[in-house]
Image (spheres, grey):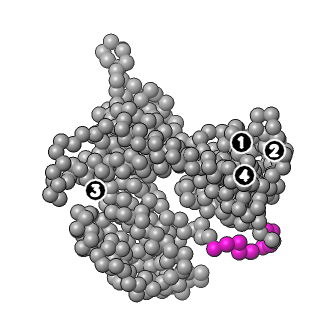
Amino acid sequence: MQYDIIIIGAGPGGYEVAVEAAHKGLQVLVIEKQALGGTCLNEGCIPTKCLCHSAEVLDEVKEAAALGVNAGEVTFDINAAMARKDAVLDGLRAGIAGLMKTPGITFVEGEAKFVPGDAHKVVVGEVTYEGKAVFIAVGSVTKFLPIPGNHSSRVVTSKEMLQLDHVPERLVIIGGGVIGLEFAGIYNSFGSKVTVVEYCKEILPAFDRDLAKRLRTSLKKKGITFEVGAAVTEVRDGVDSTGSPTNESTVVYEQKGKTKEVPADVVLMAVGRGANVAALNLEEAGIEFTPRGIIVDENMQTNVPGVYAVGDVNGLCQLAHAATFQSYRALNHVTSSNPSEEGEKLDSIRLDIIPAAVFTTPEAAMVGLTEEACEAKGIQYKPLKSMYRANGRALSMAAEEGLVKILVATASEAEGAPAEGSILGAHILGAHASDMIHEIAVLMNQEARITDLADMVHAHPSLSEIILAAARG
């Protein structure tokens, strides 16, 4: 059976573009071996945000007396929180199942593998399907440190953390990236004693260093312990004096030349995710890849014409919305009248301008370049800052902790340097940062200057005025 497009994977890089392609009149086959929605919906973005919201409400109720609201005794039921999370996921999966019934889409449940020697043919069970174009959107898998005890009985991944039926007394998180910090905040609010052990000198290595340090300081005030510049060397299951196993593990790490230990009832392995390149017979199909991911060009096309890789599997940007828009770029290439024409502009999608957010309390968000990236690229810039504590709306919300930082290009005679006044990036720490960052993303997509932002009227009182205050310097 032949289709215009075969899409392997029904996550954000698969199901949304399937609908888009069907609306363009293409015949689309979507293949998924697990649950609809991919990692983001089933064990990532959405379930984590459900628990983030439970934690946020719990914190607000605990602090309500300071606002004149007396809520009485506050208790928390993790099983109820998990049940609500599961109900949200069930509803969203049902919605995607409905999308898979869009005219022009055929959905097949099963594991797809490429036919050796032909990357335009895949086999599911005993049935072979052929596609004029093929989109690989199979996502990523959890990474584990190559250390003793990395798969011991109390080591879990984000998937298992989202299914716990109890709040662990002591939670040790290996990794201070987005996944680790969100779970640190969640379970700290739920009542766990949380320790985060991070190999790098600072948490959130990909974020602005100043913002990351401020976030760490804020989370420390909430009771989370951080061990940065620490290399975990072992997870050791406990035994008593008779040699019988106990109910705790010990995380062993090296820090500043010393060996240290921290006990744990649960250990979360949160050291990132790797491209899922082991599942499809890529080598036999002649598709080039590295441990980082499948190699693609600016249109997400692999070395095999008509075969594309989008989302986590290409290793470019492990964010759900990046996967979606990478797949749109690939579709635009497939449907272009001159897909092979050098330098043809297919669309206005800016894959170099992708907002990212961390749903801690306070939230952190960024778009564009960090100061460290500007320095590495030799770009001359100036940072413009404004603090939440100077904003009336933030004070009224009891959300005075945070800042907005906008990086702006300064005059440079270097060839290819950004124009003076160009917005290079923005970094926000504080309430609703994940929403506010999009104002800067929109302006960057429109190639606006900082003076354009400074002249835009903002509503008062609003958090967005913090952005305006930074722009006006």
User: Which quadrant does the C terminus fall into?
Assistant: bottom left
- The residue tagged with tag 3: helix, strand or loop? helix
Magenta-highlighted residues? 339-348
Q: In the rendered view, tell whether residue 445 sits above or below residue 457.
A: above
Nearer the N terminus, badge 1 or badge 2? 1
- The residue tagged with tag 4: helix, strand or loop? strand
Q: Nearer the viewer, residue 133 or 412?
A: 133
- Residue ID at (77%, 66%): 335
Q: Mark 2 points at which residue?
A: 129
Q: Marks 1/2: CA distance?
A: 11 Å
Is residue 53 visible in the rendered structure shown here?
yes
Left or right of residue 63: residue 155: right
Of marks 2 and 3, the one in the foreground = 2
Q: Magenta span has 383?
A: no
User: What number is the disc on residue 108?
Assistant: 1
* Residues packed near mark 3 inside 10 Å, few (<14), some (14 to 19) or many (20 plus): some
* Residues packed near mark 1 inside 10 Å, few (<14), some (14 to 19) or many (20 plus): some
Q: Mark 4 points at which residue?
A: 105
- Residue ID at (51%, 46%): 91
Q: Residue 375: x percent and y percent?
A: 47, 71
Magenta span: chief secondary structure: loop
Q: How many marks?
A: 4
Q: Which amino acid does label 2 sit on?
A: Tyr
